[in-house]
Image (tube, grey):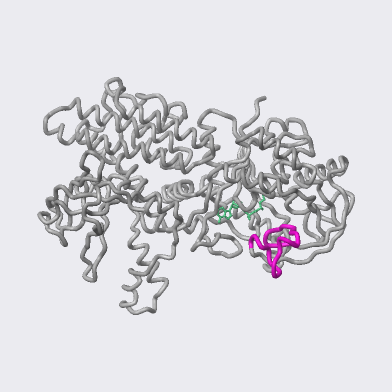
Amino acid sequence: MSKSFYVTTPIYYVNGVPHVGSATTTLIVDAVIRYHKLRGEKTYFLTGTDEHAQKVADAAAKAGKTPQEFVDDISQRFVEAWKRLGAEYDRFIRTSEPQHKATTAEVFRRLQATGDIYQGTYEGWYSVADETFLRDSEVEDGKSKETGAKVERVTEINYYFRLSAYGDRLLAHIEANPDFLIPDTRRNEVIAFIKEGLRDVPVSRRNTGWGIPVPGDDSQVVYVWFDALINYLTASGWPSDGWEQLWPADAHLVGKEIYTRFHATLWPAMLMGLGLPLPGHVVGHGWWLVGGEKGSKSKGNIPAPQDVIDRIVKYSGAPVDMATDALRYYLLRDISFTGDAEFGFGQLAVRYNGELANNLGNLLNRALNMLHQYSAGIVPDRAAATASSEIVAAALHATAAVESALDGYNPGAALEAIAKFVAANNKAIDTAAPWKRAKEGNQEAIDQALYIALEALRVVSVLSAPFIPKAADEIRRQLGISAQPIRWSDASTWGLLAAGTQTLTASPVFPRYDAKKAAADEAAEAAPEKPAAQQVKKDTAIDTNLISIDDFAKVQLRIAEIKTAERVEGAKKLLRLTVDAGEGEPRQLVAGIAESYAPEDLPGRKVVIVANLQPATIRGVVSNGMIVAATDADGKAVLLAPDKPDLAPGSKIR
Ligand code: ME8
């Protein structure tokens, strides 16, 4: 039997309930596994809970429960949360299970037999919050220098693991397998950590009644991290027959704080000691920050996934399934692998409205609406005629980009490629302008434009299925192809959408999220007693949701010169502008400045534009970017101009 593609999440501590941080790692694995499943591969997705921590026993005592009662309850909360998020795991492992206890004892015995585990006395520091032993040099003022967590002095008869013997072998493995550690920045960190010199690590603690007893020595329990890492092997069934169908894991996905010390050093060394193959990849992502600090269970500063879903439902009116997919989208789109990312409802709204409601939702809506208007909702016979369209090449390009991103465990890059492909399609419809062709009576041109858009949406339904599975199904339902199962290979075959397919009338998959109302409600909740005047002032306060320099660098601000300006018919506030942004050809923008500026005063003025904003259609006019303006005390727009009037259009603003 062939080996399954096997990927794991960390097993989460049950000292608190699931939050959007733990949800993110689970969803990354879910997206990767779904992608491999769609490719027809045999897959195995492992997640679960880590139950023997000291902090879990402490939390149980605080709740007035026995540790076992406590972990049974919280573990179930993880099961439920992952089900609600659509995480299709194959096994939910719990370290309090008999099978895991037996495997851990077996690993311990084997490493004792080879001399890799030996007896020694440990006196030093232990941080319960991080469940980590620390050296004197890692402690300052009773706290871990790295995490700030409180430490306690412990003296216990202990067992050690001979980690110091594995430095050279680990370095050799990392060298020989350049993609073992992902991303590169973490690989460099690990190499530096190992080169500093590895020391043997304690692997047991005094038995206080909670944990897996050390085989043959009931006075000790196995150190929780040693026990926890073994879960990945337990799930394979090792050492019973058949374990090679799962082991080695193809990848372990983890957050950065448990990367270097545990998953990239201790765990591979343990496997080397057992003579077992190492996992294919260890992939580490950064943290969601909340107000600049790591979001964590113990601080309670990070929302539960369900709270975010409820909020999306409340402010968009989306059904729960679509709100769930919207949360999946945001977490997978914006989690950073090289740095950290601020979790914020503002940014969630930007992604939701910009990429789901506007970009994707709009493409589906307008393509179906026009198909119903011009062709009774029936897919035209235009596959052959559209095969030379630029969109076909773009579809292949997007598919390749999504594959390479997912092969590298980078869902954000995959979603970016999909969003670009959808935007290219919106642009292609604008250019083909079926509504104009209708006035000319050119049905062939209409059919071609609409076939391209609908077929592109079919491709998008395949590419986006690992990330937003319910929305992908909904797109296919509206396209009239829900009876056909999704297969990954169908993304790269143009023309599969059959002529004559009866589509449904469009209904918005992602209704707009009312970010203004959400922000207003939040402000009111935060300051119910404040007088109105003070609340107005809040508008000018600097948002404390800090962004990183990398986030800022994503916004391309440019100097542009206004060439023409005219009012948009029927819209009091809007002007249609063409501007020279140094690109050779002028670009068209729509700006809400008609109440502050007369069109005839504008040509020749230099302004600042956001050049890489996704195109939007405002009152039927396409806007490629946005002019930035300040607001004066009366609420009027004030354009910003460079200090040097002859500054060339296209000049970058940093
Ligand atoms: O460390 N941002 O469990 P844990 C992003 N039991 N991801 C986050 C996050 C945040 N703010 N907070 C948590 C443990 N995570 C051990 C693991 S594995 C053999 C044992 C995610 O409950 C991230 O994946 O503290 C992180 O590594 C994991 O949850 C830590 O979960």
Q: Is residue 128 magenta?
A: yes
From this viewpoint, is residue 325 visible? Answer: yes
Magenta range: 126-147
| In the image: residue 538, left or right of residue 101 | left
Picture coordinates of residue 395 (x, y %)?
37, 30
Taking the spot 41% from the left edge, 71% from the top edge, the residue there is: 525
Taking the spot 62% from the left edge, 43% from the top edge, the residue there is: 187
| In the image: residue 456, left or right of residue 50 | left
Q: Is residue 335 above or below residue 233?
A: below
| In the image: residue 417, left or right of residue 596 | right
Picture coordinates of residue 651 (x, y %)?
29, 48
Q: Nearer the viewer, residue 281 or 549?
A: 549
Determine which quarter of the picture holds residue 61: bottom right
Q: Nearer the viewer, residue 330 or 542?
A: 542
Query: In which quadrant will I find the N terminus?
Result: top right
Picture coordinates of residue 148 (x, y %)?
64, 65
View extreme (top): residue:
384
Q: Nearer the viewer, residue 343 or 69?
A: 343
Q: Is residue 144 above or below residue 269?
A: below
